[in-house]
Image: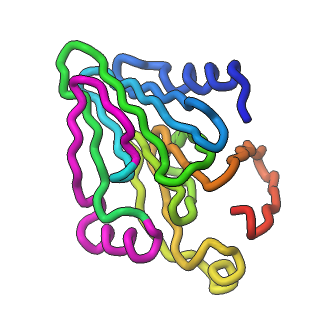
Amino acid sequence: QASKSQLNCVHHFFSMNSSVEPSWTLQNPGSFASIHVKLAPGTAVNCEFDAVVTISQGIELRGFISGGILGALARIFFTKESFFTTLVENTNTVDPADVMMAPSEPGGIVLHKLNNDNDDLLLTSGSYVACDTSVRVSSEVQTGIGNSLLSGTGFFLLRASGSGCVACGAYGSVHKYTLGVGETRLIDNGHL
């Protein structure tokens, strides 16, 4: 569980340019975590269709098919994600607005910052909650039959790429490790 200073650090990290980028804050870390995103006028984020808990005045919600029909079908059948993605946009031209989001199942949430196109994040089925509009989320086949059968993650994963914030959820606690260059960490398959 993160301390208050860590949460403030995360908030500060994601709101360096709050006039342009959405400001992400993790609330109630632990089993029933949620995400609060402050949106400057004209900014937006994407999320799972059932992730929105509450919105303020000025927010407009729109569903769309991300990645085309085939990409959406792959997401729904292979990764247990939804066919539609929700665009949460502050349509107000002057005032900021906000949205609160949470995963459909209770559990922890981690906010992860992608820095560029070489900083992809692989997600297991059901763990994607929301992301900046500058982040692309697509499904892909896991390489190697051994990885697919023995990892407990299935044949398909989600890949988040681009630059921006990604919110990932898990049924249970989430522990984030930042590894140095060349450093590795083994994780038991039953805890992915």
- Answer with left or right where residue 39 lies relative to residue 124: left
Classify 103 as above or below 94.
Answer: below
- Answer with left or right where residue 123 lies relative to residue 98: right
Q: Whole-percent x and y of residue 165?
A: 49, 39
Classify 149 as above or below 107.
Answer: below
Q: Whole-percent x and y of residue 90?
A: 25, 28
| Quadrant (top left/top right/bottom left/bottom right) for the N terminus | top right
Residue at 35% of width from left, 17% of height from top?
19
- Viewer-side residue, 188 vs 50: 50
Classify 87 as above or below 138.
Answer: above
Residue at 33% of width from left, 53% of height from top?
49
Residue at 23% of width from left, 41% of height from top?
61
- Answer with left or right where residue 118 lies relative to residue 18: right
Q: Is residue 6 magenta?
A: no
The magenta segment is 51-80
Q: Whole-percent x and y of residue 115?
A: 53, 39
Quadrant assignment, res 83: bottom left
Q: Whole-percent x and y of residue 125?
A: 53, 65
Quadrant assignment, res 130: top left
